[in-house]
Image: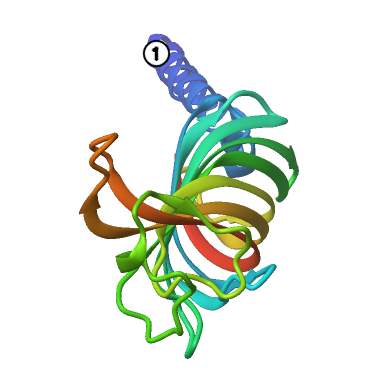
Amino acid sequence: MRALSCALALVGLVGGGGSAAAGKVSLPMESARASWQRPGFRLALGLGYGRLVGLSGAPSGRLLGPLLRVGARLDARWSLAGSFQYLSASESGGLSGLRFAGTLEPTLHFGRWSVALGLGFGGLVEGRTGRRDATPPASTLETSLTLADADPPLARCQGVGVAALLRVDWMWIVSARTATGLSLEGSGQWTGCEDDSGRIDPDTAEPIVRRQWWPHVGVTLGWQVAWR
């Protein structure tokens, strides 16, 4: 009788332990999508391809290059990020150089979709382009000169200005730590180009330059991988 009691007690312990273990295993786990909605650090790397279209005589070009985005998810609806682009800008008779930009972007999320509005800086760095130069030539200037418009454009632009963008993203959650997706971005940029004559103004001791303002609009399709 005593042996039977001990056996029953042992079975009860084993059964209870199994139930406890089963209870632990059956606890609900956070989904990968829910984990991406939590506040925290975000990093995304990608590749962009698009076109920058010059207005008022400014040259145009195709864009291709890397994208970088660093920021933080604030809550389930909002993020704040900094976006950086370093894109090759090239086209026969048009832009020939590098287009760079950095913007601060409040972002609103709707499930897999998000909409970002960015404002910051954008610029161009060109080498030799082969374009016909604007007049008057820099070599004839006695003081710095700002040209009235961008038609015809300077033969080479090196400058920076204001940039703004509107972007729509679609993301696919791969895991609790990784996601990937596509983006479509429309942008505008107002670049202050300068062409240095290589001479110094004797009155101000400042370089003698030609200046020209180039307005651009653009569209870029991007693919990115993000981590949290």
Q: Which residue is mark 1?
A: 6
Q: Is residue 21 above or below residue 64?
A: above
Could you tell me residue 73's position as x and y percent?
57, 30
Which sits in the foreground, 104 or 21?
A: 104
Q: Residue at x 49, y 74 (%)?
A: 134
Quadrant containing the C terminus is top left
Q: Is residue 158 above or below residue 156?
A: above
Q: Residue type at mark 1? A: Cys
Q: Is residue 148 above or below residue 61?
A: above
Could you tell me residue 110's position as x and y percent?
78, 42
User: How many numbered marks are there?
Assistant: 1
Which sits in the foreground, 200 or 153?
A: 200
The answer to whether residue 121 is seen in the rendering is: yes
Q: Residue at x 73, y 46 (%)?
A: 115
- Number of other residues with Cα within 10 Å of mark 1, as a class: few under 14, some 14 to 19, many 20 or more: few
Which sits in the foreground, 141 or 177?
A: 141
Disc 1 is placed on an element classified as helix
